Amino acid sequence: MTQFVALLRGVNVGGITVTSADLRTLFDELGFTDVRTVLASGNVTFASAKRESHAALKGRIERALRDRFGYDAWIVLVTRAELERAVDAFPFEADDAKRQPWVIFTSEAGVVDELMRFADEADADVDPLAAGEGVVYWNPVKGTTVGTPFAKLLAKPKYKPLTTNRNLRTLRKILG
């Protein structure tokens, strides 16, 4: 039995509303066990005994979300162990009250390198960035998370199906 976390991109924003109850029902119907939703921002933990590739599992979940809820569903799928490693490796002062501790998850390995090329030219005070295993860590000043140069890079349409971000506090709740 493998423990997974599905991080859905873009639910309960921009007119796409998916209730936690409906999300749990869908994951139950897909044959998963120990299904739990965390907050209303598209976080689902579940267990799967079925042997299928990571890509096949991700694709199956995305198709089911599209079919059931009628939107372009993209997820980043990680194991619980991968999520724990990402949280434990956060390289910045996570409790700095002036900053927002973000973890950007990617569904394709090369995206971390692509995003980190931006870090070579970024102002480290405005956009503090660090690469992790399958993630990019970002720790901007509170209130600036949509206006910094890195935020504008992440907002580009090409990253919509490839990334999703979560605050470190949210990730700790998911693991809780």
Image (cartoon, rainbow, N blue to C red):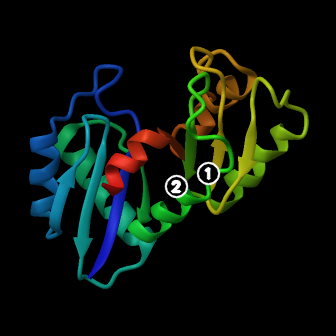
Indicate the secondary structure of the residue bearing disc 1: loop
Callout 2: few (<14), some (14-19), or many (20+) C-alpha neighbours within 10 Å? some
* 137 lies left or right of 9: right
* 173 lies left or right of 27: right
Q: Residue at x 35, y 57 (%)?
A: 175
Indicate the secondary structure of the residue bearing disc 2: helix
Which residue, given by chain and number where applicable, does mark 2 sit on? 87
In the rendered picture of this protein, how many numbered marks are placed on residues?
2
x then y, percent, for residue 19: 15, 35
x then y, percent, for residue 109: 65, 61
Q: Amino acid at mark 2?
A: Val
Q: Gap in Å between the C-alphas at discs 2 and 1?
A: 6 Å
x then y, percent, for residue 155: 60, 27
Q: Residue at x 35, y 20 (%)?
A: 14
Q: Is residue 74 visible?
A: no
Q: Is residue 134 above or below residue 126?
A: below
Q: Which quadrant would residue 127 be assigned to in this image?
A: top right
Q: Residue furthest right?
A: 121
Q: Is residue 119 above or below residue 60?
A: above
Q: Amino acid at mark 1?
A: Phe
**Quadrant for the C terminus in the image:** bottom left
Contact flag, marks 2 and 1 (Cβ < 8 Å): yes
Q: Residue at x 55, y 59 (%)?
A: 88
Which residue, given by chain and number where applicable, does mark 1 sit on? 90
x then y, percent, for residue 90: 61, 51
Q: Residue at x 27, y 45 (%)?
A: 66
